[in-house]
């Protein structure tokens, strides 16, 4: 465990400014993790991500297990070597994609049986298997398999998912420790310093969140994630749930809000004590031509930008805003040039990573409260005319 | 004309090592120009092109005229400012795309009437119009409109194209000079130092090539291109035609072989006195997974590379070969990740630009003869197993 540590250097209200030390490097928190689904952040190259200051990225266990396969990646020396990325990587458990993307998914206490969305091949994902795959991928942080019920779900269904997730958490931890301590036959672990995070479920039911937190903490992990939010519930319900959940988590360990979110969500969650985030929004919106600016989102394909010589955001210091006009970016989008996705992605990731930098700075200076007010007053999560 | 000059510093046989000075900078020759069809080199960003050492790129007049329109680009200050590229640009006349890509193309002595391949809108491209569009784009080198007959074509058809191209060349030059001297109403010229090259046609008929060269030279241009080659004829026919054509061109002016070609074509053409090239092969092949290596081309999607930890070419110094394995590049191609096209394109363009660097060096050292022999013995223009 020597390669894992989390140190909180500053606090501002419930917000924390920390440093997460992982086998592949240090991550300044609060941190945003760009999503590298299939061993690559879509439309972004590694050197651009490094230049933007991405200190950790996320890899999708489901996708990599199916193609090219974690066995193949382990034989290459693990995901870091395979994809030529030397900085930290967090991998999810694969569960979310199994439930949302795979075909014919059947969940039992044992795990989830499903068919690949690629070719229909049948697979079985258990808590142990999810740990094995991630050990082979060799991510710096592995996530336990959990059951994330859809929203809305009734309380009984969510209670069942909480119970099952706790059961799975214990099995995942046992497997993780076996791999570390004695090794497990047929599992080629490629990162001896890998950490493992548990996941708190419970929908928007405060009592269930509390139960889930207690049971997950009882198992004991290096960090704790909050799952099952930003799945359709209103933002206020998410913030309220966060209020009740974060305070149940150990203060000294990192807290990761999974799959969140819009920029104002990040600010609100940091305000409530969250340290880590991942989300496809900046990269997916980029490919759809939706670009983040101070006041919201602009749609670059809009005809109003055809002769607009301004950068996306005149105050933005990103390499795209320093070089290209909205008129050019609109042309690239309209023409279907790959440079469109690439440049849009750079800008949006810069927006997210820069927002996190400003959040960290505000916490250090003890001004996060006013930063938050300014941000929420300025930014609206809608398409704007600008 | 002060912003245009061409200085030959070294000769090795018929091969020349020169410097082409253009309004936006100096181009070391022999030079290869990556093709930026629609205001962007497909799957490559400007800063990558700069880092690879691309000193000049090509823009397609046909595509830019249709979308976003040269009027719009002129209002932005010209193509350089529009696409954020400060180095030299050469634009073609649009003719080749009109003949090969547009619908319902009808050619008369006046010009070519055609329908846009995008939406069927009818356009007319005349020698004057091609000059006007390129003046608005503001490229450093504009090309005259010519008629490029398909291959094979009978001698009468090629003779007709030669005659018409000579007629068009005179009209294109007159228009170019009018724009420069007095300006032309409704033409917003964005690069006062633009040069204009004539084009020699004549298929593989030596006598017609001679006639075309004489008539084009009689008009008088800053440089001369050889068009209508690499359109299907065997390489030997191209080299033979080059032998007879290049010697008819003024020694002191740059010679540009249009749309050529495979790496061995570049070596053979430099050997015969050519200074400039453009071709979509490195970028298009990259997107199809075909990567250039010393001995030929490899197809990265081949299953043999699934567990191949070597870079594309162990001796290559490009940013892709320094960081990524064949196994990873095969995965990206198979998964359909955009990074596949981006990385493959970087490697292939590096191969072409590096080949030109080595050619220039060999000419300086007077060793181009042995370089050529080595190159032709090593490189085969076929898919190889490696």
Image (tube, coloured by chain):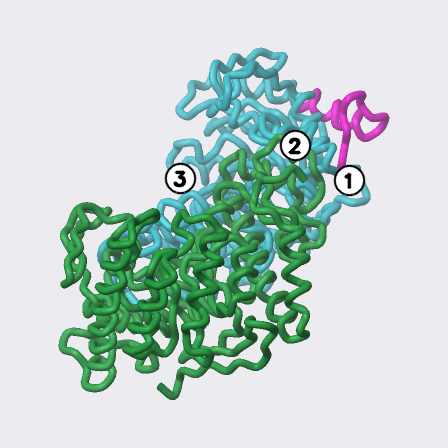
Chain colours: A cyan, B green
**Do discs 1 and 3 share a chain?**
yes
Write the residue at 17% across / 61% down. Answer: B111
Same chain for labels 2 and 1? Say yes or no. no
Which callout, 1 or 3, points at the residue further toward the start of the chain? Answer: 1
Which residue is the extreme one toward the bottom? B2
What's the magenta region? Answer: A169-190
The disc at residue A193 is 1
Magenta run includes residue B368:
no
Q: Return the residue found at the far front.
A: B207
Q: Which residue appears at 64% of the width and 75% of the height?
A: B364
Circles 2 and 3, Cβ within 8 Å, touching? The answer is no
Mark 3, other Cα within 10 Å: few <14 / some 14–19 / many ≥20: few
Pointer 3 residue: A236
Whether the residues at callouts 1 and 3 have beta carbons within 8 Å, the answer is: no
Residue A161 in the image: x percent, y percent? 54, 19
Residue found at x 22% / y 63%: B164
Image quadrant in which the C terminus of chain A is located:
bottom left
Coordinates of residue B244 in the picture (x, y in percent): 44, 65
In space, the residues marked 2 and 3 are separated at their CA atoms by: 53 Å
Disc 1 from disc 3: Cα separation: 38 Å
**Observer-nearest residue: B6 or A257?**
B6
Q: Return the mark for residue A76.
A: none
Looking at the image, which is closer to me, B94 or B166?
B166
* Image quadrant in which you'd find residue A178: top right
Q: Is residue B221 left or right of residue A31?
A: left
Question: In the figure, residue A36 lies in which quadrant?
Answer: top right
């Amino acid at each position: 465990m020597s390669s894992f540590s989390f140190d909180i250097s500053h606090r501002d209200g419930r917000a924390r400014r920390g440093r997460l030390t992982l086998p592949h490097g240090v991550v300044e928190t609060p941190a945003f993790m760009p999503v590298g689904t299939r061993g690559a952040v879509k439309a972004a190259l590694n050197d651009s991500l490094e230049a933007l200051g991405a200190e950790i990225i996320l890899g999708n266990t489901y996708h990599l297990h199916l193609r090219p396969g974690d066995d193949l990646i382990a034989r290459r020396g693990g995901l870091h070597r395979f994809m030529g990325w030397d900085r930290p990587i967090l991998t999810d458990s694969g569960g979310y994609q199994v439930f949302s993307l795979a075909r014919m998914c059947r969940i039992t206490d044992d795990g989830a049986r499903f068919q690949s969305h690629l070719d229909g091949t049948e697979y079985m994902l258990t808590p142990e298997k999810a740990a094995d795959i991630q050990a082979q991928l060799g991510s710096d942080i592995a996530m336990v398999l959990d059951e994330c019920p859809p929203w809305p779900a009734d309380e009984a269904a969510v209670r069942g998912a909480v119970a099952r997730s706790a059961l799975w958490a214990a099995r995942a931890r046992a497997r993780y420790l076996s791999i570390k301590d004695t090794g497990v036959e047929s599992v080629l672990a490629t990162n001896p310093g890998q950490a493992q995070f548990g996941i708190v479920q419970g929908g928007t039911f405060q009592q269930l969140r509390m139960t889930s937190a207690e049971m997950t903490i009882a198992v004991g992990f290096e960090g704790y994630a909050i799952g099952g939010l930003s799945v359709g519930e209103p933002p206020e319900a998410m913030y309220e749930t966060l209020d009740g959940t974060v305070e149940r988590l150990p203060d000294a360990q990192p807290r990761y809000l999974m799959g969140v979110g819009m920029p104002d969500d990040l600010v609100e969650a940091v305000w409530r004590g969250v340290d880590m985030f991942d989300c496809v929004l900046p990269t997916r919106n980029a490919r759809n031509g939706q670009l983040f600016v101070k006041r919201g989102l602009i749609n670059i394909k809009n005809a109003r930008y055809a002769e607009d010589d301004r950068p996306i955001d005149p105050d933005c210091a990103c390499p795209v805003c320093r070089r290209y006009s909205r008129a050019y970016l609109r042309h690239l989008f309209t023409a279907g040039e790959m440079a469109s996705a690439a440049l849009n992605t750079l800008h949006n990731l810069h927006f997210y990573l820069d927002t996190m930098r400003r959040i960290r700075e505000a916490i250090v200076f003890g001004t996060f409260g006013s930063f938050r007010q300014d941000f929420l007053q300025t930014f609206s999560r809608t398409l704007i005319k600008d």
